[in-house]
Amino acid sequence: MNKTVNGKTKIYGLIGNPVEHTLSPFIHNSLAEALNINMVYVPFHVTSGNLKASIQGAKALGVQGLNVTVPYKVEVMSELDTIHKLAKQAGAVNTIVVTSEGMSGYNTDIEGLKQCLINNQISLRKGHIVLIGAGGAAKAAAILCASQEASRISIINRSYEESYLLKEQVKKYYTLPIDILNYDEISKLEEIDIAIQCTPLGMYPKIDHSPIQEDTFYKKCHYAVDLIYNPAQTKFLHQAQVNGCYSVNGLEMLFYQAVKAFELWHHQRVDKIVSDEILQELKHTIYQ
């Protein structure tokens, strides 16, 4: 990528720990080049205890916008001036927009998952959704399911306390039924419209891991979504596919949350032709 950096170049970036393997610079710098925007996007490795200083430093240096990844999506909220509605509902921020009034927090993970499902013609409305895991990714998925009028959410997780906190977070804003199950209670589930895998289990290099082993679970599912994108087909998705489920990995969610952040920063829509081309380049880069 041939980019000229000069005195008018605006800086955007990612804060997290770790950040070494992030794909966000590829996505954002490709979008900037395609749309002829004079900016650079770089990862900032923020070590434990330095979040507040990093936000203050970004302000002082005139950084125009930030993405936030683990482990700071919740902690960063206390450093911001305003929080967007869906980010407040999810209890997590992954995008910071700098305005004349200060720093505003958004959760574009929700929008990214929404666009991923739309692209694959998967509707949450009136569906029974099973969320596997109850951490940060599950928060975004749960708020999306509730806001899109799912009929029921079932949370499968090892920690009842973590599941309960997620349930209560959603119940602050929505009234749909939410069940909590542990892995020994999977057989209680009947028909599952969509199963969304929100844990790190199965991520490279531990590709032989899956949170659910029983084929009977997958036989009940119509759609299976894994928020992991590396490998392209996790063991979870492989089991889903061989048992007749339509399966989707997490790359499109990652990509479209970045596109949404880019649009918020630059106050413009990214044309579908542009985004489709960059998404294909991204797939070629990591799955070739």
Image (cartoon, rainbow, N blue to C red):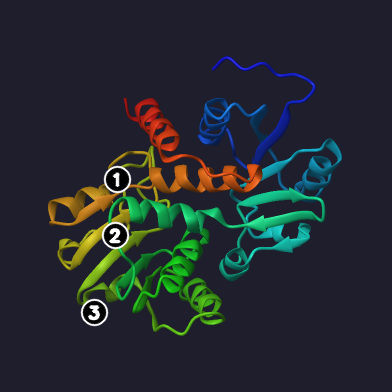
Task: Measuring from the top left, give residue 211's x and y in whole percent.
Answer: 32, 58
- Residue under the image location 69 percent in, 63 percent down: 83
Q: Is residue 141 left or right of residue 15?
A: left
Nearer to the camera, 156 or 244: 244
**Residue 168 numbered mark, or none:** none
User: Decide: marks 3, 1 in contact (CB < 8 A)?
Assistant: no
Asked whether, in this view, residue 40 is left or right of residue 57, the answer is left
> Circle 1 — which element?
loop
Tag 1 or tag 2, which sits nearer the N-term?
2
The residue pinned by badge 3 equals 188
Q: Residues within 10 Å of mark 1 (few under 14, many from 20)?
A: many
Q: Residue at x 46, y 52 (%)?
A: 112
Q: Image height check: is 135 above or below 16?
A: below
Q: Which residue is mark 1?
A: 234
Kindly tell me whether residue 16 is visible in this rendering: no
Q: CA distance from mark 3 to mark 1?
A: 25 Å
Question: Could you tell me residue 109's position as x and y percent?
Answer: 51, 54
Say the numbered circle drawn on residue 122.
2
Q: Viewer-proximal residue, 265 or 55?
A: 265
